[in-house]
Image (tube, rainbow, N blue to C red):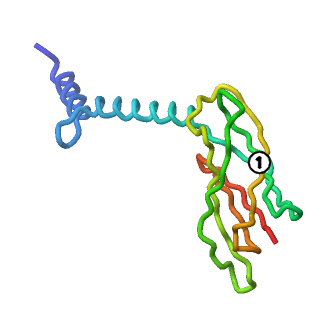
Amino acid sequence: MADPSSLQHEEIVRRRSRDDRGRDVHARLRGCCRAAALYLLAMSAAQGATFSSVHYDPNTNALVVTMIYDGTNPNHQFSVQWGTCRPLGHDGNHQIAADVLDSQWDDAAQQQFTITVRFSLAGVNCLPAAITLRTAPKYEYTLQVP
């Protein structure tokens, strides 16, 4: 005959491994761990580009941006997609955000490359402005342009 205290312990363990609806908690936990592992794997493959340096060149009315990115080749092209210009206070200053896009955003991250690109401000009727450049995933750089 089994010890009543061990039977009681087995019943407690069995109840704790099931949630309120009778689902196996351990199976759900394994599923969540697999999903998290897949997410981390995808994020490591899609590191994106980062900003090494950014400055405004008043002679050419352009942003000079040095990008560091991972890929299989150095032939990535970067472009900018401007957001909406918004007033910033009452002194005539503005703010605008721009997404920096990589033509080969899904390129496998095998080597690190550096490139300097120029983004013209000729079509941006929003100056003076605090310009925030963004690139995936969540890298930002803000500078004031007169």
Q: Nearer the viewer, residue 43 or 110?
A: 110
Residue 55 versus residue 115 in the image, above or below = below
Image quarter (top left, top right, bottom left or bottom right) of the N terminus: top left
From the viewer's perspective, is 19 left or right of 65? left
Q: Nearer the viewer, residue 115 or 42?
A: 115
From the viewer's perspective, is 144 left or right of 7? right
Q: Residue at x 67, y 38 (%)?
A: 76
Q: Regarding mark 1 in the picture, which secondary structure is present there? A: strand
Image quarter (top left, top right, bottom left or bottom right) of the C terminus: bottom right
- Dividing the picture into quadrants, the one containing residue 67 is top right
Q: Residue at x 45, y 31 (%)?
A: 38
Amino acid of disc 1 = Val
Q: Residue at x 83, y 60 (%)?
A: 56
| Residue that sits furthest to the bottom in the current view | 90
- The residue singled out by tag 1 in the image is 117
Coordinates of residue 142 in the picture (x, y in percent): 73, 61
Q: Residue at x 30, y 34 (%)?
A: 28
Q: Nearer the viewer, residue 26 or 39?
A: 39
Mark 1: few/some/many CA within 10 Å (<14, 14-19, 20+):
some
| Residue that sits furthest to the left in the current view | 1
Coordinates of residue 105 in the picture (x, y in percent): 58, 39
Coordinates of residue 42 in the picture (x, y in percent): 50, 34
| Residue that sits furthest to the top in the current view | 1
From the viewer's perspective, is 119 left or right of 2? right
Coordinates of residue 25 in the picture (x, y in percent): 28, 34
Residue 126 versus residue 91 in the image, above or below = above
**Total number of numbered discs in the rendering:** 1
